[in-house]
Image: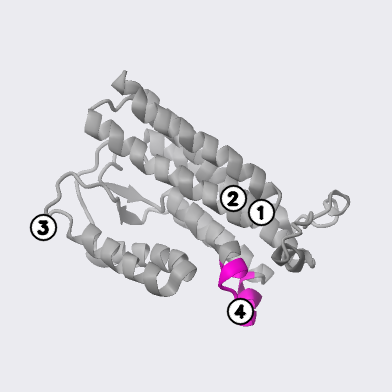
C-alpha cells in the first residue's frame, strides 16, 4: 500500500496543474498561480515520500515528469501566451479590474501570431523533461533550470502586476520585447548545461548542506522583505548561488520534484 503514496501525491500534482490550466486560459492569473504553487508543493513531497518510504520506481519517475509537463510546462506557456496577447491590447487593464476578458479574440489569431511564441516555454519544458528521464546524472544536482523553478518565475509576472505593480514595473513586464526576451532566456535555461543544486537533504548536517541552508535562509529573508518580487529574485539567486558555489556531486537517477 505504501508504494502508492508517492504516486498519489504526483496525481494530486496533475490535478492541480489541470485546474491551473483552466484558470490560466481564463486569465485568472492569481488562481492559476495558486494551483501551480499547490502542484509544486505535491511535486516536492512525492519525491520526499518516495525516498522516505524507499519505494522509488520507474513508474514514479515517468509519472512525475508527466505531471511536471502539465503544472510546470503547459501552464507557464499559457500564461506567457496571455501576457503577450495582453501586451498588444487593453486586455491587461481589464484584467486588473477583474473582468478577465479574452485578451486575444479568436478573430484576431490569424493576424497576430506573436502570443504563440509564449508556447515555446511549453515546448522547451517538454524537451527538458524527456531528456531528464534519460539522463543518469541528475539526482543530487540538476543540469539546466528545473521546470518547477521556471514555472514559478513565469507565473510570478502577472502576480507582480496585480498586487505589487507600479507604472514603471508594469511598463517593463508588459513590454513585448521583455516578454519575448524572457521567453527565449527561459527556453535556454531549461535546456542549458548549467549545473544547479537540488533541494534534497540526505542528511541534516550543515557541512553536507551548506549551500542549501544558505540559499533557504536568504530566500526566506527575500520573501519577508520583497514579497512577490522575491519570486523572480530567488530564481536569479538560485542560479547565481549555484554558479558561485560550483555545486558538484556524483549524480544518480532522480526526479525533478
The Cα–Cα distance between marks 3 and 1, rounded to whole angstroms, is 43 Å
Mark 1 — residue? 28
Query: Which is more N-terminal, label 4 or label 1?
Result: 1
The Cα–Cα distance between marks 2 and 3, rounded to whole angstroms, is 38 Å
Query: Nearest the camera: 207 or 193?
Result: 207
Can residue 191 be seen here? The reply is no
Can residue 186 be seen here? The reply is yes
Magenta: main secondary structure: helix
Q: Which mark is residue 32?
A: 2
Check whether the beta carbons of the residues at disc 2 and disc 3 lie within 8 A of each other.
Answer: no
The Cα–Cα distance between marks 2 and 4, rounded to whole angstroms, is 22 Å
Residue 45 lies, in percent from the top left, at 34, 40
The Cα–Cα distance between marks 1 and 4, rounded to whole angstroms, is 20 Å
| Structural crowding at the residue carrying mark 3, measured as other residues with C-alpha within 10 Å and reported as few (<14), some (14–19) or many (≥20) | few
The Cα–Cα distance between marks 2 and 1, rounded to whole angstroms, is 6 Å
Left or right for 186, reference 239: right
| Structural crowding at the residue carrying mark 1, measured as other residues with C-alpha within 10 Å and reported as few (<14), some (14–19) or many (≥20) | many
Question: Marks 2 and 3: which is nearer the front?
Answer: 2
Residue range (magenta): 160-173
Mark 3 — residue? 207
Mark 3: which secondary structure? Answer: loop
Check whether the beta carbons of the residues at disc 2 and disc 1 lie within 8 A of each other.
Answer: yes
For the C terminus, which image quadrant? top left
Mark 4 — residue? 166
Query: Which is more N-terminal, label 3 or label 2?
Result: 2
Check whether the beta carbons of the residues at disc 2 and disc 4 lie within 8 A of each other.
Answer: no
Image point (21%, 53%), residue name: 248
Mark 1: which secondary structure? Answer: loop
Query: Which is more N-terminal, label 4 or label 2?
Result: 2
Image point (65%, 77%), residue name: 171
Amino acid at each position: 500500500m505504501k508504494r502508492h503514496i508517492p504516486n498519489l501525491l504526483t496525481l494530486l500534482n496533475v490535478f492541480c496543474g489541470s485546474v491551473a490550466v483552466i484558470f490560466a486560459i481564463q486569465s485568472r492569473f492569481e488562481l492559476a498561480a495558486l494551483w501551480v504553487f499547490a502542484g509544486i508543493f505535491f511535486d516536492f513531497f512525492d519525491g520526499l515520500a518516495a525516498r522516505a518510504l524507499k519505494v522509488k520506481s520507474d513508474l514514479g519517475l515517468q509519472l512525475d515528469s508527466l505531471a511536471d509537463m502539465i503544472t510546470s510546462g503547459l501552464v507557464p506557456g499559457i500564461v506567457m501566451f496571455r501576457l503577450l496577447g495582453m501586451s498588444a491590447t487593453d486586455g491587461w487593464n481589464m484584467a486588473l479590474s477583474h473582468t478577465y476578458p479574452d485578451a486575444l479574440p479568436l478573430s484576431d489569431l490569424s493576424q497576430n501570431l506573436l502570443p504563440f511564441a509564449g508556447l515555446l516555454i511549453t515546448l522547451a519544458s517538454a524537451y527538458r523533461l524527456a531528456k531528464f528521464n534519460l539522463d543518469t546524472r541528475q539526482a543530487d544536482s540538476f543540469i539546466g533550470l528545473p521546470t518547477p523553478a521556471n514555472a514559478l518565475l513565469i507565473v510570478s509576472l502577472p502576480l507582480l502586476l496585480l498586487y505589487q505593480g507600479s507604472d514603471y514595473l508594469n511598463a517593463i513586464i508588459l513590454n513585448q520585447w521583455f516578454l519575448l526576451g524572457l521567453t527565449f532566456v527561459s527556453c535556454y535555461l531549461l535546456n542549458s548545461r548549467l549545473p544547479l543544486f537540488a533541494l534534497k537533504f540526505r542528511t541534516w548536517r550543515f557541512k553536507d548542506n551548506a549551500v542549501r541552508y544558505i540559499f533557504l535562509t536568504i530566500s526566506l529573508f527575500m520573501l519577508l522583505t520583497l514579497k512577490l518580487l522575491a519570486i523572480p529574485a530567488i530564481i536569479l539567486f538560485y542560479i547565481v548561488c549555484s554558479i558561485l558555489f560550483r555545486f558538484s556531486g556524483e549524480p544518480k537517477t532522480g526526479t525533478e520534484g
